[in-house]
Amino acid sequence: MIIFYSYIMSLEGEEEFIPDYEDIEVPPVAEKPPVSPVRFPPANTLPNSPIPVPVPSQNSKSLHVPGIGPTPNLQVMLTVPKVNKKKRNTKHCPLFNCGISTTHLRRHVVRAHLPWFMQPDTACWTCQVQEECACFLTAKHTAEVVSHPSGAGFSDFNAHRWGFLFNGLLWQLCRRFGLTSIQALLDFVSNSQCFPIVTGEAFFTEELMRMFRYEQDHEASPVGDITSFSISPPTRIVALGHWRILLDLVGRLSYSHQQDLLASSQSLTQAGEVYLPSPQTYMEPTIFFIDSHFHLDSLLWRTQCTDLASLEASTELASSFQLTQAVTNYVFTSSWECLPAQPSMDPRLSWTVGLHPRFVGHVDSFKDTSKFFASLLPTPGCVGLGEIGVDEVGFDQPAIQRQLSFLETVLPLAGQFDKVLVLYCRGPNASTHVRGILRSLQLLHLRIHLVGFSGSFSEAKEWLSVCPNASFGFNSKFLGNPVSEDAAGRLSLSRILLESDSPYLSPDPRWPFNTPWSLYAVAKRISILKNLPLADLAYLTSCNTGALYKI
């Protein structure tokens, strides 16, 4: 028996590890001289002077131990415990029969102690299971489960179903506590203080939208603002769905009753009546949206319509996909004469004025053009400068340099009049050039709308690292583009705008022109990427446009 000390370093050599002491019996090896005993290092060198032991590769059949030599056919398990690693804060599940420690208490409670539908955004509505987060749901049911790739997510129909399932859960709690109505359960929670003390935001935006939908479907006097929900104490029935309130209520039940609650799947009304969903009892909700970028002058010319309302009357989809507001851009010198009369004909319209970079060569004096813009920007209804920018495709270096010179001349107007800067960047170096000019003019703080964004998520992050108030417009150009779809899926929803760029970029080559109502396909795709009902996606992106343009 030969006993030795092995002091092990990490494979990268960056972290030091605790010495590992092992007893290893070395079998006799034929025709090998006897080995001498191992000399123990001095005690004062043990902690800080480890002896490195070479670790064999996967294909190696022997291990060379200092002082012992090669040991063929000897399998040694090297335990490499890491030290000095920052520990993540863990929380204990407060249920007496659980005892789990986790770094994400909310996720644990939702998955282990609440019915599958209580976090509908991350649930599979076909298999009726709860995933840890939306990325797991997408990987499991979009990529692997081919039998129902489109029915797994939280659709508009499932958002309607959720309210009745939630009522069924509340009624089950009422029976366990001997209460006669859901309103009595709300009073019980308030009187018993079964609610957490929350000083900040208690709900995520997606949860607020779901609560708002519930109010519209089930309350006689629904709230008019999604920010009016409170849980400290809860003032509305739907606020009982907060996971901390449900956790407190579940903790007051016996283990068998907890298991019954976990399997809750009954659909009821607030009055306790059974609800049986069917295609005849549910109609798709009307979806309202804002088109953040289109060209009214070109659209009316191509369609031969007199105004936007007459075009809307001839569009079949307009009844269920309703345009509430829109921002029209006047970027051609021939259309500047339409301002401000043409957009003023429809109260839903706001407008911007600019010069598309492809037509910078059509103006003789940049200073005169800048003065013309300055005369229009203070006009009521004008909300932005643009679109302007850099287009490197099809232009030589002198033409690109002229575009950059024009930008340097007119960009300060956006800061002077506090308008949104509508930017068009196309080409490998276009974004870099524009950010450089913004930095040199100290205009990185401007509100920016990057129209027709088709870049990667890393490019979007680069923009946000320099211009924190930038938003990204997605149109039909991103459909089917894996790079752009990845960016839309990973970007924060608060940065996403819907834009048609009509009459250009028709999503169907059979259509001679595009319209704002063709945004339905774009909105539908982003709602799938974000795992949100289409109506909620349209509402939230409309809020983004309204906040950016202050309309």
Image (cartoon, helix red, strand yellow):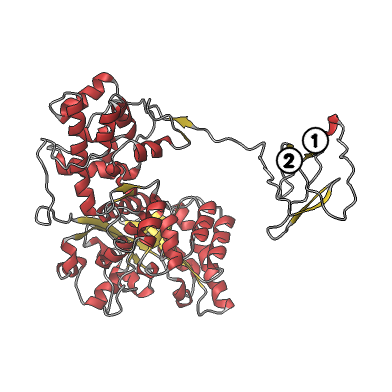
Task: In this rendered view, identify the residue nearer to me: 122 or 377.
Answer: 122
Residue located at (74% from left, 36% from top): 21
Find residue 3 and report its horizontal and vertical position in percent: 80, 38
Q: Is residue 422 something that shows in the picture?
A: no
Find residue 422 and report its horizontal and vertical position in percent: 42, 61
**Of marks 2 and 1, which one's residue comes earlier in the chain?**
2
Residue at the spot of label 2: 16
Left or right: where 385 falls relative to 335? right
Left or right: where 49 falls relative to 358? right
Q: How far apart, in angstroms, are the residues tagged by discs 2 and 1?
A: 9 Å
Three-letter residue code for mark 2: Glu
**In the picture shown, does residue 130 fall above or below 138?**
above
Find residue 222 and report its horizontal and vertical position in percent: 17, 38
- Farthest residue toward the top? 191
Q: Which mark is residue 48?
A: 1
Residue located at (34% from left, 38% from top): 203
